[in-house]
Image (tube, grey):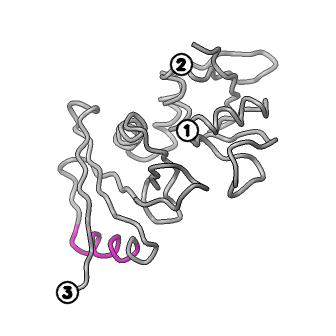
Amino acid sequence: MPKPISVELIEDFLVVWNTTEASKLYERGYFGKPLGIPKPKTTTFDAPLILDLIEGLYLLEEGIIDVEENLPSRRKVDTEKLRALAQEVYEDFNAKYAVYRDLRKNKYAVTPGIKYGCDFAVYKYGPGVEHAPYMVSVKKRGEDITATDIVKAGRLATTVRKRFIVASPSPKDEKDVKYLIFKWFKA
């Protein structure tokens, strides 16, 4: 198993400063965003890599990265501390993280979906290789979703040529995630 990549926690994001390691991590599954490169055309680049807390926690749990804060003093950050920080930053973090982890375990590339008004943009192959075919919104089981919410999301998904998916993790078993995919057609 390769040595974990060193990552620095700065407030509520993580940075891979070593550009060679940053490129390798991005190439490994389209994790993060290269600093100053909004839409990378290739998986190799010469820039630090910015990770959000959801990605960081997943990579830390998988043993792919080591997280430190205040790099001169090199204080290690464990999964519990990173999870606690993420729970402060993200609304409904546990549900979103359960879906993120499930999608990653099923070999999808996952990026934030904020520009589509959802939680995640999901790729079969990766950003820069294809446009995200799916937009995923996370809803806790038992949480209300209105017909208007579905129609709005469906209209947006159709406009940007994506499939709209509602993902719902079980509150009792976060490895149990159900997906409801909507397909729109003209009558």
Residue type at numbered disc 3: Ala
Q: Is residue 123 left or right of residue 95?
A: right
Q: Is residue 141 left or right of residue 130?
A: left
Which numbered circle lies on residue 187? Answer: 3
First in sequence: mark 2 vs mark 1: 1
Circles 2, 3 touching at the beta carbon (< 8 Å): no
Classify 10 Å Cα crowding around label 3: few (below 14), some (14-19), many (20 and above).
few
Vertical comparison of 15 with 121: above or below = above
Question: Which quadrant does the N terminus fall into?
Answer: top right
Which residues, given as a range, are shown in magenta?
146-156
Q: Provide the secondary structure element on which disc 3 rests.
A: loop
Q: Residue at x 65, y 14 (%)?
A: 3
Residue behind mark 1: 29
Classify 10 Å Cα crowding around label 2: few (below 14), some (14-19), many (20 and above).
some
Residues under labels 2 and 1: Cα distance? 15 Å
Residue type at numbered disc 2: Gly
Residues under labels 2 and 3: Cα distance? 50 Å
Q: Is residue 60 magenta?
A: no
Residue 8, image quadrant: top right
Residue behind mark 2: 63
Classify 10 Å Cα crowding around label 1: few (below 14), some (14-19), many (20 and above).
some
Residues under labels 3 and 1: Cα distance? 39 Å
